[in-house]
Image (cartoon, rainbow, N blue to C red):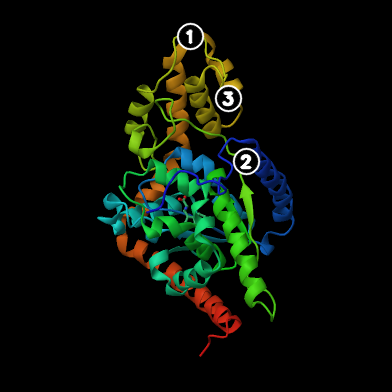
Amino acid sequence: MITTSPTPGTASPAAGSPADAIGTSAAQTRSAELEKLIQEDPGRFRVLTGDRPTGRLHVGHYFGTLHNRVRLQDLGVDLFVIIADYQVLTDRDVADDLTGHVEELMLDHLAIGVDPSRSTIFTHSAVPALNQLLLPFLSLVSVAELSRNPTVKDEIAHSRQSSVSGLMFTYPAHQAADILFCKANLVPVGQDQLPHLELTRTLARRFNDRYGNGGPVFPEPDALLSDAPLLLGTDGTKMSKSRGNAIALAADADETAALIRRARTDSDRHITYDPATRPEVSSLLLLAALCQGGTPQQIADGIGSAGAAALKKTVTEAVNEYLAPIRARRARYAQDRGHLRRILREGNERARDVADTTLGEVRRAMKSDY
Ligand code: TRP
């Protein structure tokens, strides 16, 4: 049984502690440098990123991370997107319809402009050589190190499961395999994923130190932190599908309007952008600004004293207009499941080729290429 409370001597900085802030600001400085390098020479970079297939993605995901994937792809970076289907096996609701969940995630990516002729979308379960990397990686990390991972600790604390599976406990090492199988050197992440990236770098280093006599096998990938603004759900809490407060990319214009109509605001008719004291109103202004351009302040000035109803009308129009082409593209892809499956099969094949090559190098380095 794995305990979720920190044991003496293994405590790690909790989110928001000074130590965490230092780690984050170093990552932010590095990210700014990386942005420059990407602009200069995008061909130097291979990005791996991805998601668990837990449902349709929403505007929070879009402005937080998805948009950035397409931006990198369009700059000329080699983009790999993993659908982490082996990370959701313990979630019964997802596991009961894994194919459906994987297809939804693919549709969202294709809808926003991930281009399967330039980028590779694939699933864990279809790439055996990727998964095989997990075994040597697990030999290079201690149970104490795995127990210290603050993100896993947090997920365990909030999990609905009565016990912690081995899969849950080891998934950061699996995630290292996701990243290193294709020798990605850049991983766009949110702050919660920084501990996993740190482990990935550690595993790359340890593997190279131990087995890399003929030269390092793995790069030590960098985190690319985005400065994406945080959007709240329509009830003013964290945007999340399970809370019913998220505008899904796949939602239609009427559903979007209904959700925004019910959104929480406050009693001050004069609309101003002030995230600290008016989080709900400010998040709506931010969403409108992200969709239609300009700053949240400018949008607030345009509404003035016209009140929450006018604000909601502006937001609804901005979101629906922005998402219209994305939704149209999503609907086109959704009509042809055969085509969708072919895209996934091709992505999986490409990922398998890359993984087989890497595993070959790993086995040679480990002298187990019998
Ligand atoms: N753990 C990530 C999440 O829950 C998903 C993921 C799996 C991932 N493998 C990855 C993210 C590799 C970045 C790189 O969101």
Residue 196, x across and y down, in percent = 54, 54
Cα distance between the residues tagged 3 and 1:
17 Å
Please state which of residues 43 and 117 is positioned toward the viewer in this rendering: 43
Residue 249, x across and y down, in percent = 40, 42
Three-letter amino acid code at the position of disc 2: Asp
Residue 6, x across and y down, in percent = 50, 44
Residue 143, x across and y down, in percent = 49, 59
Is residue 80 placed above or below 18 in the rendered structure?
below
Q: Quadrant of the N terminus?
A: bottom left
Sequence-wise, which precedes: disc 1 or disc 2?
2
Which of labels 3 and 1 is toward the front?
Answer: 1
In the drawing, what numbered circle is on residue 268? 1
Q: Which residue is drawn at 43% across and 25% down?
A: 236
Residue occupied by mark 2? 20
Is residue 183 visible in this depiction of the protein?
yes
Q: Residue at x 63, y 50 (%)?
A: 224
Left or right: where 339 falls relative to 4: left
Which of labels 2 and 3 is toward the front?
Answer: 2
Q: Residue at x 50, y 78 (%)?
A: 356
